Image: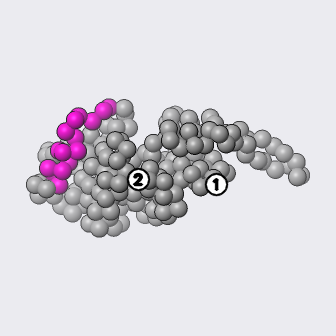
Amino acid sequence: MNTRALSFATPLLAAALLAAQPAGAAFTVFGNGLAQLCSETAKNLEHGIAPPPRAIEDCTTAIEYENLRSRDLAGTHINRGILYMSRANYAAAKRDFDTALAIAPTVGEAYVDRGAALVGLRSFNDAIADIDHGLALGSEEPEKAYFNRGLANEGLDNIPAAYRDYARAAELKPGWAPPLNELSRFTVTSKGT
């Protein structure tokens, strides 16, 4: 009987976890103020567009001074958290995602993004729990959830689960480089049992 087995070069694990950044799922805020600008800036990160130097401050000004509906306020915290993650400030990002969830506890993106911040903080079990909850609530960008969960599973040395998550992310968004880069480190072989 033949089974499929995963072969993984373990010396690459530590380097890969340090090199791969968790992916943030931006939240769309409509309007013409700083909250909307914060939303666009967070979305532009995916396209490789660097945020302006004052991007986080603009989000903060929107949070503190714009009259936002609850969902837009939560979304602006999510977007500022994504900007913090782009600077590898995972603790500040997590605080923003915590605040977003206190305001709007049914927004799947906030759980997925908090899971991404937890990956950055190397709290892998908590990251998986949040990402799973975000997927259950319905994430608008599930490929990012699977990618981040792959990073968390890899951090826990659950290599088969990490491979499946990266493969699912690549399937959901064909051509997206982050999961393809991670998958390139794996070799699937057959071996008899």
Q: CA distance from mark 2 to mark 1?
A: 19 Å
Disc 1 designates what residue? Answer: 158
In percent of width and height, residue 57 lies at 18, 45
Do the numbered discs 2 and 1 sit on residues whose CB atoms are within 8 Å?
A: no
Residue extending furthest top? Answer: 49
Q: Earlier in the sequence, mark 2 or mark 1?
A: 2
Q: Residues within 10 Å of mark 1 (few under 14, many from 20)?
A: few
Q: Which mark is residue 117?
A: 2
Give the residue type that dot 1 points to. Asn
- The residue positioned 23% from the left and 34% from the top of the image is 52
- Residue 32 screen position, x and y as percent: 14, 44
SS class of the residue under badge 2? Answer: helix
Drawn side of residue 47 relative to residue 180, left or right:
left
**Magenta run includes residue 52:** yes
The amino acid sitting under disc 2 is: Ala
Label 1 residue SS: loop
Residue 135 % position (x, y): 47, 59
User: Vertically, is 153 above or below 185?
Assistant: below
Q: Is residue 12 left or right of residue 6?
A: left
Q: Nearer the viewer, residue 72 or 154?
A: 154
Task: State whether residue 93 is above or below residue 12.
Answer: below
Q: Which residues are drawn in magenta? A: 49-63
Please tell me how many numbered marks the rendered image carries: 2
Picture residue at 14% right of the left edge, 50% below the top: 61
Along the line of sight, the residue nearer the viewer: 22 or 87: 87
Residue drawn at x 22%, y 56% as measured from the top left: 72
At 49% from the left edge and 50% from the top edge, which residue is drawn? Answer: 148
Q: In the picture, residue 137 is in which quadrant?
A: bottom left
**Position of 10 compared to 97: left or right?**
right
